[in-house]
């Protein structure tokens, strides 16, 4: 039996013993009373009674152990032309001062702090400073618009918002302050203060009394010590898209999170203290939380924070340049980023000048990895493992992966390999029974989820139970559909809700429908995610106008596109919409979104027996073909 199977079986035979052992790698100020609290099944809590501080585990203990001079964070920013390295001692010093300054503003254990920040080192310091105080951070991705920020502010009611004057996209500077000002106008909740990091590329106008310049905020602040928190206390809330337009606040605890992420570094990624790890993502997403900030620092690795894009900053050789310049051992990105590089530099000629010599492996996640992209990456990386792995904001760390640090399993393109020890992945049919091998069903995980996964949602257990645990009792429903093969390799095929993945960003078409439907001329609408060779999926909208509206369709479409951009953000990539005479519906009025998607994607589709008016689908087929889609005749 191989090491993977041995580890998996060891975990399965005694999950609590397994996680008790993993917990020994974390510094506790009070040992947990138990490994798992099952008393509120189906809500489970890891390490009850344990006390610790996540920032201590990510910074202080490495300095204490003599590694203060090791590089902790390398900020590489081609958009500003700067590279800055912070050792563990320096990052600790800065973080403790930021924590002291936050404490001076009145932030303490359990208080929330929203971070609306670009990819700057101060964002990492602010996250860790919250952890140091036992405060709960909630990072909002910079590509979201004011209304999305306002929803999150109202949901988690922060005392303080930390922001920067601007983010830098290759084509323009994104001014954050007008977005934040607007969000604070829209929000009902009142924040005490906004702390603003002024960047040289743009100086924001501050609101006296409310806003504090970052330097003034820090001036004279005393370093704050670590506040001891319960293992089960929240470390952060991260909002993500779900089945409805309202984002869900995924909660992460302190104890389970530290244990799981610390272990995942060697077990899944095959890296350890002193290695250089680079997750080319954004701190606004879970990948950024887990593998730019917490995972690598908990383990004592050097983490790379990259403020740039895979292409255009300045070219498709950027990733290889970063790997070479910083001696990256293992890197992680989304398949879409590799498709961007492949599109611009199909033979990877730009790698020649930047041989990523030390790179041992490339991990991909965030969306389905098409075999073409995986094989291309394998080809250019000269036999280094290219590992597709599968996880979600809710789980916080990989559910299925080829765990390089345990045993490299054979790669099967199209599959993120097998369940990571800690996860009992099941494919369930409609009735909740295990689906036969090869048959598609709902991908679920038997409860309890391992440490590090969300124990509940911000705002209540009920929403967590209703949304994830009640459909298949005893299981967590991932909302992905897929199957397993005879070797227990998992294949993730699609979402079963209205979530789409655009350029590795998780978005809700339901939320886009809400925005489109609110246009005064729109009677009803549908937004579906259609396949896109570059971004994986992009949203496509269809709107029916109210009777009597006879404005030029192009004008209405332009307004719809602008509305989604203004209300959700540019990251929604909502650029295609059409005015149609009717939406395809069943006789009971259900919009046939799945059929629209299958038609647009050139898949086999069936004319539903219950369709209200088949000619609507004929019109739709003609429309899609006029956009260049090849629609198959229905089966
Ligand atoms: N702040 C403000 N705006 C942002 C932003 C941010 N942090 N991130 C993206 N945007 C804007 C972009 O400028 C773009 O605006 P535009 O419509 O005016 O051009 C829009 O949002 C769409 O962005 P995106 O979908 O990211 O497209 P892109 O062409 O700018 O970049 C990729 C495409 C593939 C290069 C980029 O998405 C990428 O690197 N993706 C990796 C995904 C990732 O990090 N996933 C996290 C999980 S690993
Ligand atoms: P997020 O919460 O933003 O990390 O997005 C999680 C969703 O992205 C999952 O539910 C999947 O739909 C998709 N996803 C992530 N990784 C993979 C993968 N390796 N293969 C297929 N889909 C993936």
Image (spheres, rainbow, N blue to C red):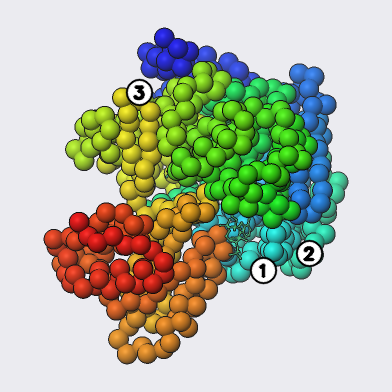
Between 492 and 238, the residue placed more toward the observer is: 492
* Residue at mark 1: 178
Between 446 and 505, the residue placed more toward the observer is: 505
Q: Is residue 495 above or below residue 299?
A: below
Q: Which mark is residue 81?
A: none
Give percent across and percent down for residue 536. 47, 52
* Residue at mark 2: 202
Question: Is residue 465 shown left or right of residue 252?
Answer: left
Question: Is residue 151 shown left or right of residue 41?
Answer: right
Distance in Å between CA atoms under marks 1 and 2: 12 Å
Residue with the most extreme top position: 1
Q: Which of the image's four quarters has the N terminus?
A: top left
Q: Which mark is residue 487?
A: 3
Q: Which numbered disc, 2 or 3, marks the residue that appears first in the sequence?
A: 2
Q: Is residue 81 above or below residue 611?
A: above
Q: Secondary structure at mark 1?
A: helix
Q: What residue is drawn where x is 68% and y is 38%? A: 128
Q: How many marks?
A: 3
Q: What residue is drawn where x is 37% and y is 90%? A: 550
Distance in Å between CA atoms under marks 1 and 3: 53 Å
Which quadrant would residue 304 be assigned to in this image? top right
Q: What residue is drawn where x is 81% and y is 38%? A: 85
Q: Secondary structure at mark 2?
A: loop
């Amino acid at each position: 039996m191989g090491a993977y199977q041995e580890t998996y079986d060891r975990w399965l035979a005694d999950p609590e013993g397994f996680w008790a052992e993993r917990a020994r790698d974390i510094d506790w100020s009070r040992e947990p009373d138990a490994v798992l609290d099952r008393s509120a099944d189906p809500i489970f809590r890891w390490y009850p009674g344990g006390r610790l501080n996540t920032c201590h585990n990510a910074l202080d203990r490495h300095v204490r152990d003599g590694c203060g001079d090791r590089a902790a964070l390398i900020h590489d920013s081609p958009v500003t032309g700067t590279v800055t390295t912070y050792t563990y001692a320096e990052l600790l010093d800065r973080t403790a001062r930021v924590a002291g300054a936050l404490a001076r503003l009145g932030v303490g254990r359990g208080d929330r702090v929203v971070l609306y920040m670009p990819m700057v080192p101060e964002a990492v310091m602010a996250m860790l400073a919250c952890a140091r105080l036992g405060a709960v951070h909630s990072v909002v991705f910079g590509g979201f618009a004011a209304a999305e920020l306002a929803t999150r502010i109202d949901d988690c009611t922060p005392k303080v918002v930390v922001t920067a004057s601007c983010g830098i996209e290759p084509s323009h500077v994104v001014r954050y302050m007008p977005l934040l000002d607007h969000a604070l106008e829209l929000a009902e909740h009142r924040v005490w203060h906004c702390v603003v990091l002024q960047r040289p590329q743009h100086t924001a106008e501050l609101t006296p009394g409310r806003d504090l310049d970052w330097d003034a905020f820090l001036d004279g602040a005393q370093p704050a010590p670590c506040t001891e928190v319960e293992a089960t206390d929240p470390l952060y809330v991260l909002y993500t898209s779900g089945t409805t337009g309202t984002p869900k606040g995924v909660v992460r605890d302190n104890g389970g999170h530290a244990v799981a992420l610390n272990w995942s570094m060697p077990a899944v990624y095959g890296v350890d203290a002193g290695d250089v790890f680079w997750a080319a993502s954004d701190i606004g997403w879970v990948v950024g939380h887990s593998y730019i900030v917490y995972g690598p620092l908990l383990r004592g690795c050097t983490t790379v924070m990259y403020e740039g894009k895979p292409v255009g900053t300045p070219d498709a050789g950027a990733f290889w340049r970063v790997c070479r310049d910083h001696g990256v051992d293992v890197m992680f990105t989304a398949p879409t980023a590799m498709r961007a590089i492949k599109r611009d530099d199909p033979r990877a000629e730009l790698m020649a000048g930047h041989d990523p010599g030390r790179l041992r492996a490339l991990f991909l996640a965030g969306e389905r990895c098409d075999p073409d992209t995986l094989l291309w990456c394998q080809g250019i990386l000269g036999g280094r493992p290219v590992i597709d792995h599968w996880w979600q904001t809710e789980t916080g760390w990989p559910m299925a992966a080829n765990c390089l640090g345990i045993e490299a399993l054979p790669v099967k393109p199209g599959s993120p390999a097998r369940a990571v020890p800690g996860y009992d992945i099941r494919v369930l049919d409609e009735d909740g029974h295990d689906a036969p091998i090869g048959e598609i069903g709902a991908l679920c995980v038997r409860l309890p989820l391992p440490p590090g996964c969300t124990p509940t949602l911000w705002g209540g257990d009920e929403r967590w139970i209703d949304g994830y645990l009640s459909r298949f009792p005893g299981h967590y429903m991932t909302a992905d559909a897929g199957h397993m093969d005879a070797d227990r390799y998992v294949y993730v095929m699609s979402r079963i809700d209205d979530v789409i993945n655009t350029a590795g960003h998780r978005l809700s078409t339901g939320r886009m429908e809400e925005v489109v439907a609110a246009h005064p001329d729109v009677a009803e609408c549908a937004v579906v995610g259609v396949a896109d060779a570059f971004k994986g999926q992009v949203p496509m909208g269809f709107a029916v106008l109210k009777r009597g509206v006879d404005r030029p369709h192009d004008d209405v479409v332009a307004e719809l596109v602008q509305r989604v951009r203004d209300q959700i953000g540019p990251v929604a990539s909502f650029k295609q919409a059409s005015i149609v005479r009717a939406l395809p519906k069943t006789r009971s009025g259900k919009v046939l979104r799945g059929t629209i998607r299958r038609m647009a994607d050139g898949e086999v589709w069936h004319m539903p027996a219950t369709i209200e008016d088949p000619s609507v689908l004929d019109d739709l087929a003609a429309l899609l073909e006029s956009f260049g889609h090849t629609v198959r005749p229905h089966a």
